[in-house]
Image (cartoon, rainbow, N blue to C red):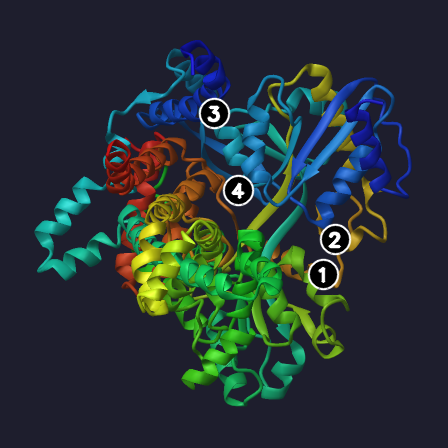
Amino acid sequence: MNLKTLAASCALIASAGASWADCGIEAGRVNIIGNEFPAIQTIAAEAAECATGGVTIEANLTADHQTLNVAGMSGNPAEYTSAIVANSSIVALINEDVIRPLDDLVAEFGADIPQRQKITVGGKVMAIAFMANAQTLAYRSDVLEQVGLDVPTTYEEVLAAAEAIRAAGIMDHPVGGAYAAGWNIAQEFNNMYLGHGGKFFEDGSANVSINNPQGVATLEVMKALTEYMNPDYLTHDSNGTQAEWEAGNVALMNMWGSRMQNIMDDEGSEPQVYENTKVGGPLMVGDSGVPASTLWWDGWTVSKNISDDDAAATFRSLAHAVSPETLTDDTMEQAVWLIDGYKPAPVSEGVLAAVKAGTAPYPMLPYMGLLHTALGDNVADFMTGKESAEQTLADIEAAYTAAAREQGYIK
Amino acid sequence: MKHSSFFWFVLPSTVLMLLFIAMPIVSVVTQSFYTAHEQVILEVENCGPFGCTQETSVDQEATAALREAEPLGKFAGFDIYTDRNHLAFGEVAAAWVKSDGLPDFGSSLMNLPFYKALGFTLTYTAIVTPLTIVLGFIVAIAVNAVAKSLRGPTIFFSLLPMIVTPLVGSLILFWMVDARGILGTGLQWLADDPNLSVKASTGLMWIMLMVYGVWHAAPFAFVVFYAGLQTVNTDTLESAMVDGATRWERIRYVVVPHLMPLVTFVALIQLMDNFRVFEPIISFQASAHATSLSYAIFNDLGGETRLLSSAAATSVLTIIGIGILLSPVLVRTWRDFNR
């Protein structure tokens, strides 16, 4: 038995209980790289069902997928035949030209895939989405009841509720949030800036423009929120924030839809906490009418630098993975699936409310990742009181511009 | 040794060094002089589960042609080195003209990513290196004085900080200084300030990182000095005792001079290690307060869009920095060797 079939059989054993499926693939090699959370594990396990004598199917699911996928798809033939990405991370793959348009494969093998799952860029299908995600409010109904307040719908109401909770002596730091320096705090800035009606770039160009009244207002609301957070907030990522929530230290937070199931289940917290944990819609801020959140999808792609057989095998096994049979009682609550036959559960109300409220999708721009990094490196300087809001925004713009010039987006 | 046998003796390591040290450095230096091509941007309509939006995308065909013509990218000379995210010549000059007084200039300088990283890296190196040597020496002297039967276990425990993986060691400390951890709560109680947080204060975070640095590196210095102590001439020590030298005088005039070459060796290794401080910044999640040159390289490569040229330029600047830092020690060693 060679290493590859061994790995493939291990993947199959891991997906114990999964049935064998005949996906009609005769030969080919499938190797999937992606993030690691339950919904993606389900997709990889379902795809692995298509393995037969001539078809090897492997998956490398890791939180470090973004540092591996471009390198692993640049060779010819590429090591990974598919990368599972989100609307932020697909851009890096398109920029490096390592994924292929799927139109011919969709025409041949993907007749059952509904239109809403197809991600098209300039008319070409580049990915097939399978789930949606967004950050929305999570709240403790018992705590809000104690202070006699309704569920907040805006950040202004969150601040008022936080003050009331603190004044009542229930919690010292009632607000939570993934404010860790780096990617997380940059994402909170994005949410809040879009919520203020801000635009990241000058129309149709890569020139950044965030040093404006919306930018200043964004930073000020964020700082006001941090006054009610655990003083260590600059080191709290989603995991850290979840831990604070489960410890019962937090009553209000903006959290990912994909994590709501984790804080609402009976693992890791007292009944007092998980029984009263409820999901709200996306929060508004200011008077722009746009929620302070972003919509995300997760989907799969097919590598460019692989043989046609491998591309077909990859497409067909993953198309099998996103077919309605994937949705069972076990998998239904793992995500807000975009797959036909999905029945919404209470945990997913937030994401659906975000879609309904007209939340903006995270921008799929080639240079957005550079701005996200520049934000992550600089926003903390304002939060720690080292700089004024204007100086912080000017620093972000300057750091982005230098990076964008190096990448050839700005002359 | 005959020339030919010397040649065959060093050949394998020379080949390996060329392959794994010299070649990558050549590649990094080359990379730092090139940037990505000017991107050909198209206005496109992107559609997905949330509807369609007008966005931009890279024109792959036009870009492929550009890449074909110049596979290395666009030659940029020293542009990357002098841009804002590195040496920032333009910004430094502007800050010099605009600032009133040196402190103001200093704070403008510390606002630039490269100088901010360099500032922490140099402070860390300058404080941690001597403290490591002093602490390692004290531990070595102390262990050497312990009864023979207890020495084994003592040495083992003294080495523990070095045996623990850096990432794990710093994570343990990270949780202990958490606002809800044992040390964090202890500090709050001592300072009588419930909002005191090591992780929120730049000063405390710097101290934390340096304490960790000394804790982690001291065993290395200890082992080297302890080995050295075993070679101290006992006759000299005994005659010093006969002459009425106190324990302190014996250490000052016999042991320390004997160990001086080892101090140079430990200083050399520690300077190199401390200048590329990296793991504690990651595991303490300290990037909001302290960044180092190594962290800057990691950050350039870890983003959604990899900044290869930027990382390459920072790597070259790090190599130059280590060269400058080590030059006094190297010159000294060279002199000792020729004496």
The answer to whether residue A194 is left or right of residue A333 is left
Distance between mark 4 and mark 3 Cα atoms: 35 Å
Residue A154 image label = none
Whichever of callouts 2 and 4 sits on the residue coming sooner in the sequence is 4
Residue sitting farthest toward the bottom: A168
Disc 4, SS: loop
Toward which corner of the image does residue B25 lie, by quadrant?
A: top left
Percent x, y for residue B304? 49, 40
Which residue carries the number 1 mark?
A261
Whichever of callouts 1 and 4 sits on the residue coming sooner in the sequence is 4
Tell whether label 2 touches label 1 (CB within 8 Å). Answer: yes
User: Measured along the vertical axis of the image, is residue A309 above or below residue B189?
Assistant: above
Marks 1 and 4 share the same chain: yes
Which residue carries the number 4 mark?
A88
**Amino acid, disc 3:** Phe
Depth check, front residue: A285 or A34: A34
Disc 2, SS: helix
Q: Which is closer to the viewer, label 4 or label 3? A: 3
